[in-house]
Image: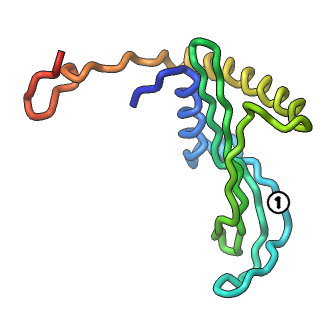
Amino acid sequence: MRYSTPAALAVLILTSAAVLPSAAGELGSAVIERLGKVVPTPAPSPHPEEKIRLISSLTVQNKPSGDSSFTFEAADYGERKGGRFRVIAIEQYSLIEPKPKARALRDEIVRKLRALEKDLLMYVELVGPPREPQKVHEMGAAGGGRPYP
C-alpha cells in the first residue's frame, strides 16, 4: 500500500490500532453514547434493544499545499443481549462548511485534530519513518516481463 501523506498513514495507524484486541484492552474501547431503549419495531425484530451511537470512521486528508479535509461517520446501533448488534442508521459528516451553530465546535475539533497530528508525527519518529515505495521491477514483475519505461 502507498499513502501520499503522513496524515493518511496516521489514520491507517489509528484505524489499525483501533481494531487490535490487545490495544483495545489496554487503551479502552471506542467512545459509545448510550441513547436508551430502541422504539419497538414490527416483526421480525421484536427483541428489546438498547440504542447506542459511536463514531465508526474518521478520515483526515491533508495535502502538502495545506489543504485539508475532515470527514467522519456516526452510526446508531441496536444492542441486544448477548453482544449482538443491528445497524439502525449511518450518516457521513464533513467539517468543511458547518452550519453556523456548529462553527465554534468545528474549530475546536480541528485544533484537537492538529494536536493529534503532531502526536502522530512524534509516533512516526519513534517507530520509524515512512518507507519509499518500491518500483515494480524491484518487486519482481509477474510473468517475467519488463516494466514499461
The residue singled out by tag 1 in the image is 34
Can residue 141 be seen?
Answer: yes
Q: Between residue 132 and residue 108, name the one nearer to us.
A: 108
Quarter of the image containing the N terminus?
top left
Amino acid carrying mark 1 in the image = Arg
| Location of residue 52 with respect to 112 vertically, above or below | below
Q: State the image coordinates of residue 113 (x, y, percent, origin top left).
A: 73, 27
Secondary structure, mark 1, is: strand
Of 149 and 20, nearer the camera is: 149
Question: Where, by quadrant of the figure, is residue 82 drawn?
Answer: bottom right
| Camera sees residue 29 | no
Q: How is the image coloured?
A: rainbow
- Which quadrant holds residue 102? top right
> Can you say which quadrant of the picture contains the C terminus?
top left
Compared across the picture, whether 74 is left or right of 62 comes to right
Q: Is residue 55 above or below residue 52?
A: above
Q: Is residue 58 left or right of residue 40?
A: left
